[in-house]
Amino acid sequence: MVTYYLLKYIFMLRHRSDDSWVMAHAPINLDTQVRVAEHLGFEFDPSTCETRDHNGNTFYASACLSETGGRRYAGLLREPYARYYDPLKADGIMTEAMLTNAYGLLRARDDFLFETDEPVAPDPDELKDMSLHGLIEAREGHLILHDDFTRPEIFYFETTNGPAGANRVHELLGRTPGVDIPKFMPSNYNNGFFTAGFTTEAMADMAMGAPTLDNLWLARHDLGPGLGNHGTSWPHTAPAIYRQLSRVAQDIVQEHGEQIHDDATRPPETVRLIKTLDEQAQVLNPTITQMSEMELRIRDGRHESVSDRDIAIEALDGIYKAARRRQHVAAAKLMVATADDSESQRNRVGYWIDLQQREGVVATRIALHEVVPHPEASEAQTRRTLSVLHSIRTELNRRLEDNSAYTLPI
């Protein structure tokens, strides 16, 4: 991947004129920001929206836009003018055909460098929706703007929810930020790389720091969907898990005070806490993926000849297997187990707490389909999806109630 961008960068350098180099890195003026925001579907008010030009931690220079209310961030890169551009004046997001025309020379080079003769079989499950039916903003692509007096301007853009947008998503799903899920607060502490001490202090107040516009890459990582990001896992984490971690954080702060911010005196519990929070995406992703793929198969017709009961049984089997795989570590990760507990006790508590986490995933999926049905699903498909999810949750809750002595308090 590094080699790819290095070659691409060298190739672009060789084909840029001095004028295009300046154009690529010149600040994006306010009028252009307003026009770009309009074509991206933003409500952009220059008097209230925060705008900054910066280099960030990505490989491109960017300017960020915030929608009114700070609900979304957008990173922009004005790209060098390409002579192979389609002359038709069509402002807005560029199609693949327009891109091929605009960057014919560069894309031809890319195709030559990375051409392969091995056919790749398409995976229909790749179409699963990990963005909570679009509630978690995460778009990228190219956008073109024309002007009567200048040549066309081409922009690469990326968008993501800001912290206020993440809070709004959680509210739509029936959560109360700051009560049963951390409230995301914008912070530029340590340039968005939050320490264990900072996160522990925040969790004690059921809050979570979120990078500001200064660091779009980290904002996407912390709040966006997709592989390696955390945005999808936050709303899928059961309130009982957050409350347990908040109780632990309160105890740590009360006992150790300012020592949590000192590398020499920081208690190991602070590091364990932040690792547990960070690993929620990894822990829950198998079940989130499983539910998303199941829902996709109902939408695209692959489950048309499968009974609801069989769909639910298959889903429950995957959930039970995931809980068994983690039963030896789940209690320790959430700092429920003690050194005096036997291995069998830790495994028993770990299994049911992990199952409790996965019930939280199913509960969130139900709330999602009730609040924002998938735009590609018919009403009948949405009803069927909800019916299957409710049956899965009913069975999980039955088992959890029978073993409530080993679960976290709700």
Image (spheres, rainbow, N blue to C red):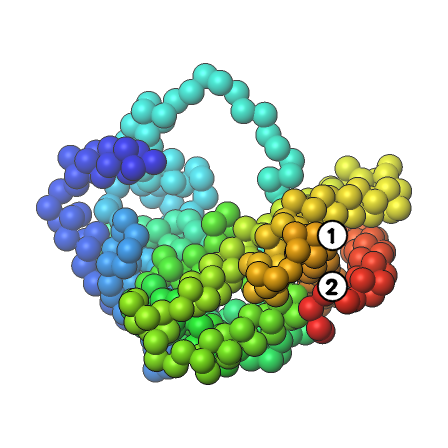
The answer for how far apart the CA atoms under marks 2 and 1 are is 38 Å
In the picture, the disc for residue 377 is 1
Picture quarter with the N terminus: top left
Please tell me which residue is depicted at 18% across the width and 59% down the height of the picture.
26
Residue at 54%, 73% (x, y): give it: 248
In this rendering, the answer to whether 224 lies above or below 72 is above
In front: label 2 or label 1: 2
Q: Which residue is mark 2?
A: 406
- Place of residue 228 in the rendered image (x, y in percent of width and height, measured from the top left): 47, 49
User: In this view of the protein, which residue sits in the foreground, 199 or 67?
Assistant: 199
Vertical relation: 112 (above or below) 326: above
In the foreground, 254 or 26: 254
| 221 with respect to 108 (left or right) | right
- Assign the C terminus to one quadrant of the image: bottom right
Q: Is residue 148 left or right of residue 368?
A: left
Q: Position of residue 253 (x, y in %)?
A: 44, 79
Residue 261: quarter of image: bottom left
Q: Secondary structure at mark 1?
A: loop
In percent of width and height, residue 343 lies at 65, 52
Mark earlier in primary sequence (2, 1): 1
